[in-house]
Image (cartoon, helix red, strand yellow):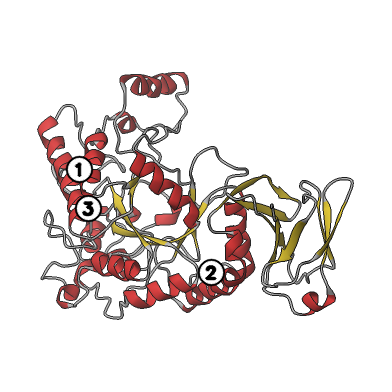
Amino acid sequence: MYIEEKDPLVRAKLEKWQDLKFGLMMHWGAYSVWGIVESWSICPEEYEWCERKHGSNPNDYNTYVRDYEQLPKVFNPTKFNPQKWAETAKKAGMKYVVFTTKHHDGFCMYDSNFTDYKITNPKYPFSDDKNADISLAVFNAFRDAGMWAGVYFSKPDWHSPHYWDPKYPPKNRNVNYNPESNPEKWQKFVDFTHNQILELMSGYGNIDILWLDGGWVRKKSNQEIQEYYSNILNNPGDNYIIEHMINQDIKMDDLVEKARVKQPGLIVVDREVKGKNQNYLTPENTVPEKELPYPWESCIIAGGGWSYSEDAKYMSGREAIHLLIDIVAKGGNLLLNIAPSPEGEWQEGAYKLLGEYADWLAVNGEGIYETRALAPYKENNICMTQKKDGTKYFFYLADEEEELPSEIVIKSHCPEAGSKVYMLGYDAALKWYKLDKGFKVIISDSIRKNPPCKYAWGIKMYTDHP
């Protein structure tokens, strides 16, 4: 259930966020040294995608975790250049960044006052660098480039003794004790989490988005817990984990209120937690089949995984452009993830992909930014968007190796009398004809021989009213 935000400052900012359409996400941490999935290999849950293969004895869990937590001692990204990333992202048409200040493993990519497990610890090699506070350097560089700053922060912290108490072995991703039976211990974790988030809201400049991960850390009602029990009793074969019933109330309402005192209008995304603190929804690595009735953003991997992998293969330019169009046509934003290397560089494939976006959006950006969904959103291979002033855009998504056709037929819409139709990238109006259903646009030979872009072509339709 989506609950609309009541705060007028947040509502206004959310409306502006929906105009941005295209953002950058970066998963980066000490785990990048091994080129493995971020954090998850230290969680005692069995998944093929986070198999333990590194360290001195990957078959022994405790040894593996010990070796993993030593990675900051060799994490030294001396080629880190946030200005280069920001300039590239801006040229590619991205409008905001969401950066991993802390993932589930608890390692802070910023100078937290509440833990030594952080990039700025004097014991770690990168602490002497001028950009040692990596999160601050990222946010400053992207703000200087005119982009919004978003803080990714993990609510669970598998390094904190107040979440995974060292007296007990962790059983899964959840807290390894019962918070309701140990209220003082849990309160220490709540305080720790609030303190860390509030320091990010205080000392890191203007923050536009607080993007919270780890949706299992949340308040659970008695009714919800009873539903879990009922499901297990009625379906004993289901693989439910008892600890999922634990009430991990992190006092999110209080935290959001305190955060917005420091950052008025802050957009909060408490992912996968139904309620008023999830200002927009975040389908992960997927795109909804149709428009959603609330603000949303698909977070999508550009190549490889969320975190760095040496052999990452990036999506093609055609795939990437069609992805953005499809998402925007359904009223969403695209948050594209690029994973830096342990040295602090982006792979060449990432630069090539963002170059494809830069070229295409330089021609077609007006039909992407500041638009909203236009029903029926897609007709065959044609996606649609519209401006608030009524201007409509129709994007013809080309098949592999397909050339610009001589005519484009759109059946679900028809221009008013006197409307003008253009191809984005050209100033001359196109000829169009009304059909029994819809209209047909004629593409001249001169345009077909020299199309304005690759992969998808935009048709603009508007009416000059007196």
Q: Earlier in the sequence, mark 3 or mark 2?
A: 3
Kindly check if marks 1 and 2 are in contact, taking CB atoms under 8 A apart as contact: no
| Horizontal arrangement in the rendering, residue 457 relative to residue 96 (left or right) | right
Point out residue 323 in the picture as x, y percentages from the top left corner.
59, 58
Q: Secondary structure at mark 3?
A: helix
Which residue position is annotated with label 3? 201
Which residue position is annotated with label 2? 314
Is 237 drawn above or below residue 446 in the view shown? above
Residue type of the residue flagged with mark 3: Met
Q: CA distance from mark 3 to mark 1?
A: 22 Å
Residue type of the residue flagged with mark 2: Tyr
Is 60 drawn above or below residue 330 in the view shown? below
Point out residue 281 in the picture as x, y percentages from the top left corner.
45, 43
| In-front residue for pair 280/189 | 280
Which residue position is annotated with label 1? 163
Residue type of the residue flagged with mark 1: Tyr
Point out residue 147 in the picture as x, y percentages from the top left corner.
38, 64
Point out residue 413 in the picture as x, y percentages from the top left corner.
76, 47
Q: Earlier in the sequence, mark 3 or mark 1?
A: 1
